[in-house]
Amino acid sequence: MALVHGFLSRRSLLALVGFLAACAGAGQQAGEMGVRTGVVEQIVDVALPTTHHAGVGAVVGGLAGLSVGSLIGAGSGRDVAMVLAAVGGAVAGNEVEKTHAQPVPGQQIVVRTGSGILISVTQPGVAGLRKGQVVYVEGHGDGARVLAR
């Protein structure tokens, strides 16, 4: 049990929390983006997978439980409290994550560009888009999105 306490010192706990925060913010880059115009041909409502990272709730809950458990008792009693609190926190964090891991409403939008090419973009729902509307298609590939003009 002393190994658990020594392995997860405050320094390593802070490093792990910093790593998880950096992972959550990754993927956002600034820069130029191509913009095309087109006309909406079709809009289909879809359910998009959640953007939550699986397992983060259990990890954060376990770490929170571990830190609370370290405040209880002394000696081997503290070690037992830390393990039990870490397991309980992980289970609770996983349950909280499940409630927030619901699909997100979205749209698959088919746009015909000025050059006659059809583009299909799947994105979170945008209010006010309708068939026949002139729109902007911003970006390319997975990063593309359709915006009202």
Image: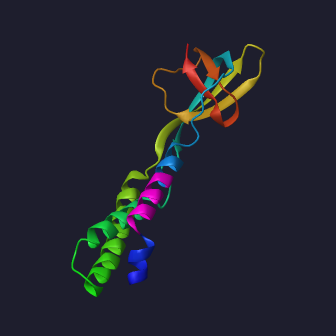
Magenta stretch holds residue 10:
yes
- Image quadrant where one finds the N terminus: bottom left
Q: Position of residue 91 (x, y in %)?
A: 36, 69
Q: Nearer the viewer, residue 50 or 131?
A: 50
In the depicted structure, whether residue 101 falls above or below residue 33: below
Q: Nearer the viewer, residue 131 or 34?
A: 34
Residue 12 horizontal side relative to residue 117, left or right: left
Residues shaded magenta: 9-19
- Please give the name of the residue rendered at 24% of the width and 71% of the height, measured from the top-left corner: 71
Q: Main secondary structure of the magenta part?
A: helix
Residue closest to the far left:
73
Q: Nearer the viewer, residue 27 or 98?
A: 27
Q: Position of residue 132 (x, y in %)?
A: 60, 15
Label total for image: 0
Residue 68 in sight from this viewpoint:
yes
In the depicted structure, whether residue 80 falls above or below residue 99: below
Q: Position of residue 64 (x, y in %)?
A: 33, 63
Residue 117 horizontal side relative to residue 24, left or right: right
- Residue 139: name its quadrant: top right
In the depicted structure, whether residue 13 falls above or below residue 24: below
In the depicted structure, whether residue 49 falls above or below residue 58: above
Residue 50 in sight from this viewpoint:
no
